Amino acid sequence: MNIGQAAKASGVSAKMIRYYEQTGLIPPADRTESGYRDYADSDVHMLRFIRRARDLGFQVAEIDELLSLWRDRDRQSADVKRITATHIEELRRKIASLEQMADTLQTLSDCCAGDHRPDCPILADLENATDASQAKGRADGLKRLPR
Amino acid sequence: MNIGQAAKASGVSAKMIRYYEQTGLIPPADRTESGYRDYADSDVHMLRFIRRARDLGFQVAEIDELLSLWRDRDRQSADVKRITATHIEELRRKIASLEQMADTLQTLSDCCAGDHRPDCPILADLENATDASQAKGRADGLKRLPR
DNA sequence: CTTGACCTTCCAACGATGGGAAGCCCCATC
DNA sequence: GATGGGGCTTCCCATCGTTGGAAGGTCAAG
């Protein structure tokens, strides 16, 4: 199976398969006489594993660890769980950060008339910002502009 | 005021100030005779605006639009609100995506004994993944391994 | 045998940020 | 007035995962 077929079967683009090989995440593929990379079903299986892990937000370095554990018959599930827990924490951190941004912006947006007039609490917030964590409070004190 | 002082006063690193200038987000700074960049309070004001917008997750391209509106006395608040709404949508999309990842992983992790044994529902999920959206359902059907 | 679709390698770009090197400038201290 | 330390300048590189493209070789169908 050449790289295009492996890409289609695994959901990992040919470009990325070459990249993963180059960076050592996956071993160098076999080659045909003419130099084409040649993949077996087991390779596609591994690529699907990688694709799935990427879809779950794991970084390549983490996937490297997960692949090692996957290949290790004597692995301890605690190791997998630990990597996963760290990743979940990271996801929750990002979520909290994005939520705070969204909430602040929503509050400001709710106070913005959104019409032809230039007055805008959103710009006012950006203009008067002194530190990153105070706008929500200030914005919550605003009143919606009359229509 | 030189770039280091402007950086300290605005919360934007000197590196980033130069970068913003280079990419055209901010106009080229005045220079002293010896070639040092020279900033006025109004420049620091603008940099704080940028910093605040970055903290709220706006991309530089969006900040470029926001700065234009900020400078435009005849702006319409509707334009600011529209940019903000688009950005909030983007944030909510990212949040939803990350939450789905975290929830799926949490479910799988809850089913993982996390001990010395090699059996691991997390690896099993990665191994058997067929498409990106089915694992949560499968995982929900798992039972917690006995301790 | 030609043509089009594939493969190969290599280089570049994205976005925002940080690190570092080489060389010049400013100010304070001796 | 010399010297030293710290800040400024520009330029290049790295990150991280991914995509795009160019130049050239290969395969398979017509």
Image (tube, coloured by chain):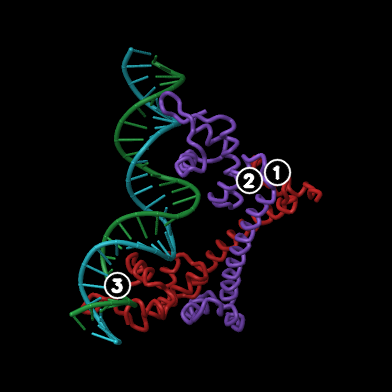
Chain colours: A red, B purple, C green, D cyan
Closer to us: B134 or A107? A107
On the question of residue B43 being in view, the answer is yes
As measured in the structure, the alpha-carbon distance from the residue carrying label 2 to the one carrying label 1 is: 24 Å
For the residue marked with disc 2, what is the amino acid?
Ala
Chain to which mark 3 belongs: A
Q: On residue A118, which mark appears? A: 1
B32, above or below A66, in the image:
above
Give the alpha-carbon distance from disc 1 to disc 3, as whole Å: 60 Å
Sequence-wise first label, 2 or 1: 1
Residue type at tag 1: Pro
- List x then y, in percent, for residue D18: 43, 65
Q: Which chain carries label 1?
A: A
Q: Name the residue under label 2.
A: A132
Circle 1 packing at 10 Å, graded few (<14), some (14-19), many (20+), is many
Whole-percent x, y for residue B101 in the image:
57, 70
Q: In which quarter of the image is the C terminus of chain B?
A: bottom right
Q: Where is residue A36 in the image (x, y as percent from the top left)?
A: 26, 76
Task: Select label 2 or label 1 by which is in front.
Answer: 1
Task: Name the N-terminal-most of marks 1 and 3.
Answer: 3
Q: Residue sitting at 57 percent across and 43 percent down?
A: B50
